[in-house]
Image (tube, helix red, strand yellow):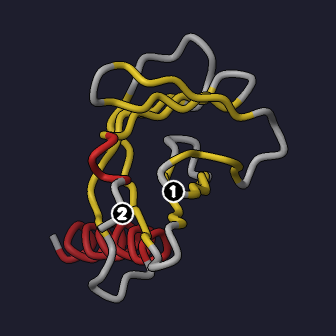
Amino acid sequence: MFRFALALTLISTAANAQVATLSGTDGQNSLGTVPCAALAGEPLDSCPAELRKREDGTATLAVQLNTGEVRRVYFTKGVPDSSSSTSKLTYETRGDIMVIFIEPGEVYEIPKAALNTQ
């Protein structure tokens, strides 16, 4: 029983450390999940994410993929203009959702309202 409790503690501690590494939050950031896929043809999954907005109109979306990698997408005035990947980034708007594509198969969906500058 003791070994089971210790293993459970280590698992939950590792999960908490992973989230803390992703967020690095100071309480001013939007935390939650976004639909994402890391590989072409993969169904969208719910991925932990953080949106860091700045007063100058820029923002960074950090998404933890199911591969363990954290992808960062950089925005200027609500438009994605680059990422932490060297691959091509494109996007399209579907109603109230912005869909971001990073070649060859990454997909991210984010509500446009989340990117509004105030």
Circle on res. 108: none
Q: Nearer the viewer, residue 84 or 98?
A: 98
Quadrant in which the C terminus is drawn = bottom left
Dot 2 crowding, Cα within 10 Å, few <14, some 14–19, many 20+? some
Which residue is most to the left? 1
Relative horizontal placement of residue 21, taking residue 11 as reference (left or right): right
In the image, residue 46 above or below residue 71: above
Q: Is residue 36 above or below residue 54?
A: above
Q: Farthest top residue?
A: 41
Disc 2: which residue? 117
> What's under tag 2, amino acid-wise?
Thr
Pointer 2 and pointer 1: residues touching (CB < 8 Å)? yes
Q: Is residue 51 above or below residue 34?
A: below
Q: CA distance from mark 2 to mark 1?
A: 7 Å
Q: Residue at x 69, y 50 (%)?
A: 83
Q: Quadrant of residue 36?
A: top left
Query: Within the image, what quadrant is residue 4 found in?
Result: bottom left
Q: Which three-letter amino acid code belongs to the residue tagged 1?
A: Lys
Instruction: Please tell me whether mark 2 sits on a helix, a strand or a loop.
Output: loop
> Callout 1 environment at 10 Å: few (<14), some (14 to 19), or many (20+)?
few
Which circle's residue, 2 or 1, is located before the other in the chain? Answer: 1
**106 relative position to 104: left or right:** left
Mark 1: secondary structure: loop
- The percent coordinates of residue 1 (x first, y second) are 15, 70
Q: Residue at x 27, y 85 (%)?
A: 27
State the image coordinates of residue 69 (x, y, percent, origin top left).
61, 52
Residue 106 shown left or right of residue 13 in the figure: right
Q: Residue at x 72, y 55 (%)?
A: 84
Residue at the image position 81 percent from the left and 36 percent from the top = 87
Q: Which residue is mark 1?
A: 77
